[in-house]
Image: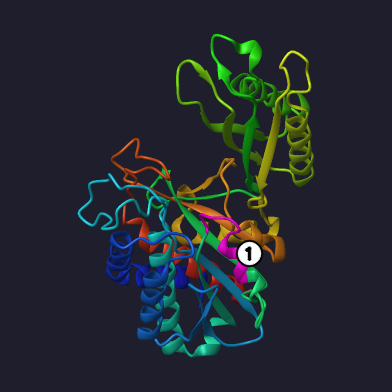
């Protein structure tokens, strides 16, 4: 089969399954579930795979792994399935029915598109034979992308990349900053390592009118916040990306009482693993030195680090391949460059193990210049992106196995 014929057939097949994808996406959107609690979501995925007569197994409690095709080679496709602790304010008719839980990151669409690709691939297997796919296509429906340690790390530990071992893995994420139907790629560093930082600053309570009899943890916290910003501005190469943001400050209860403690939290984002380790070491050592100056009258800081996801690094060869496959499918005008972001994504665990590429799928309605971003309570997407995303996934797998 020629590339042109395959491209035409895939796009036609993707549009033919648009309605089932749309219905699945809306069902999931109405019934979101938080990370590692995606029990009904998992059951819906399993039920749909059973309808399509696609064999599957459950992993990581709520994850699902399915297989289509046969042969010695294997390519994996991945979607995440969890929602966020956000109260929906999008106003869509199929809004979340669960208080304080919302699919504000598009994982409902990711799941629907992978199920759409599954239907397309299964129909091809039935009509042309299992060997016509060129190998095994492994479909990974992964829980817990939004919460450390990340569902990817758990599924890898449980063997998702074994029996058979994929030679490459592909995934995608919706992007409200890009026009519906576009696909954006970047080789190498794409998204950052993400670490969560939690401080408790200990002082000594006292009357606000007698600060000399107290040790002010608010003052200590203020110095810590400002001093830590030199980590990026003076310790990191100016040509290297890095962000340290302290995002919460909690302390005190009265206008005339110096409190005993102040609690802070924030995040470190880094693109380089060596710099990441160095930055975490410096942050910890500086915290331990807090209050050492006689100006502060004592006090001390405690730091708890929750290690997050590693940097997401797209393999150069699979990215060249995936971009070319996308250009052949939807046209070069719809394939764009993606500017790396300091976001985090646990797809990074897969690309540490095997070659892989993660791309961004535009979902902004063409008539709009702006839509709310990811993790926003008013997040929406243009469902016309669903068949494009499903076709991109199926196309990457089929063309990879045809090489």
Relative placement, left or right, of 92 versus 68 is: left
Relative placement, left or right, of 319 versus 142 is: right
Q: Nearer the viewer, residue 155 or 76?
A: 155
Q: Nearer the viewer, residue 335 or 189?
A: 189
The range drawn in magenta is 145-155
Where residue 330 appears, x then y in whole percent? 44, 58
In the figure, 255 relative to 324: above or below?
A: above
In the figure, 27 relative to 190: above or below?
A: below
The single residue placed furthest to the top in the displayed view is 209
Q: Quadrant of residue 75?
A: bottom right
Where residue 332 appears, x then y in whole percent? 50, 51
Q: Nearer the viewer, residue 335 or 120?
A: 120
Where residue 376 appears, x then y in whole percent? 38, 42
The single residue placed furthest to the left in the displayed view is 93
Q: Nearer the viewer, residue 249 or 312?
A: 249
Q: Is residue 30 magenta?
A: no
Q: How is the image coloured?
A: rainbow
**Residue with the mark numbered 1:** 153
Task: Please tell me which residue is depicted at 63% across the width and 36% down the height of the picture.
Answer: 199
Task: Please tell me which residue is depicted at 57% across the width and 41% down the height of the picture.
Answer: 341
User: Is residue 131 among what the camera can see?
Assistant: yes
Relative placement, left or right, of 280 versus 373 is: right
Task: Please tell me which residue is depicted at 50% across the width and 26% down the height of the picture.
Answer: 252
Task: Please tell me which residue is depicted at 66% across the width and 50% down the height of the picture.
Answer: 307
Q: Quadrant of residue 213?
A: top right
- Label 1 secondary element: helix
User: Is residue 236 among what the camera can see?
Assistant: no
Where residue 135 appears, x then y in whole percent? 59, 82
In the figure, 181 relative to 239: above or below?
A: below
């Amino acid at each position: 089969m020629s590339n042109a014929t395959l491209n035409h057939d895939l796009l036609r097949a993707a549009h033919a399954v648009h309605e089932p994808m749309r219905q699945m996406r809306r069902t999931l959107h109405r019934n979101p579930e938080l990370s590692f609690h995606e029990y009904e979501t998992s059951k819906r995925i399993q039920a749909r795979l059973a309808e399509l007569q696609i064999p599957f197994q459950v992993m990581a409690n709520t994850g699902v792994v399915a297989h289509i095709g046969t042969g010695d080679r294997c390519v994996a496709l991945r979607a995440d399935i969890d929602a966020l602790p956000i109260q929906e304010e999008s106003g869509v008719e199929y809004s979340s029915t669960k208080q304080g839980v919302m699919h504000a990151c598009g994982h409902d669409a990711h799941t629907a598109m992978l199920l759409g690709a599954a239907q397309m691939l299964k129909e091809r297997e039935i009509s042309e034979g299992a060997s016509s796919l060129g190998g095994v296509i492994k479909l990974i429906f992964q829980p817990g992308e939004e919460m450390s340690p990340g569902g990817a790390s758990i599924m890898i530990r449980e063997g998702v990349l074994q029996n058979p071992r994929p030679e490459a893995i592909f995934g995608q994420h919706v992007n409200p900053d890009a026009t519906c139907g576009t696909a954006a790629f970047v080789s190498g560093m794409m998204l950052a390592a993400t670490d969560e930082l939690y401080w408790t600053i200990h002082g000594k309570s006292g009357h606000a009118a007698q600060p000399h009899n107290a040790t002010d943890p608010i003052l200590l916290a203020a110095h810590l916040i400002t001093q830590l910003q030199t980590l990026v501005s003076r310790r990191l190469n100016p040509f290297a990306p890095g962000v340290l943001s302290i995002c919460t400050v909690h302390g005190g209860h009265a206008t005339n009482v110096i409190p005993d403690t102040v609690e802070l939290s924030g995040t470190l984002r880094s693109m380089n693993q060596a710099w990441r380790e160095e930055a975490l070491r410096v942050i910890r050592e500086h915290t331990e030195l807090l209050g050492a100056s006689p100006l502060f009258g004592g006090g001390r800081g405690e730091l708890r680090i929750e290690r997050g996801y590693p940097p997401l690094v797209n393999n150069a060869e699979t990215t060249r391949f995936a971009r070319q496959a996308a250009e052949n499918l939807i046209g070069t005008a719809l394939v764009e460059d993606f500017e790396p972001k300091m976001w985090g994504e646990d797809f990074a665990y897969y690309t540490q193990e095997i070659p892989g590429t993660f791309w961004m799928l535009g979902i902004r309605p063409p008539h709009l210049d702006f839509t709310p971003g990811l993790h926003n309570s008013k997040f929406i997407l243009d469902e016309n992106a669903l068949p494009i995303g499903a076709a991109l996934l199926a196309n990457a797998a089929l063309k990879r196995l045809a090489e």
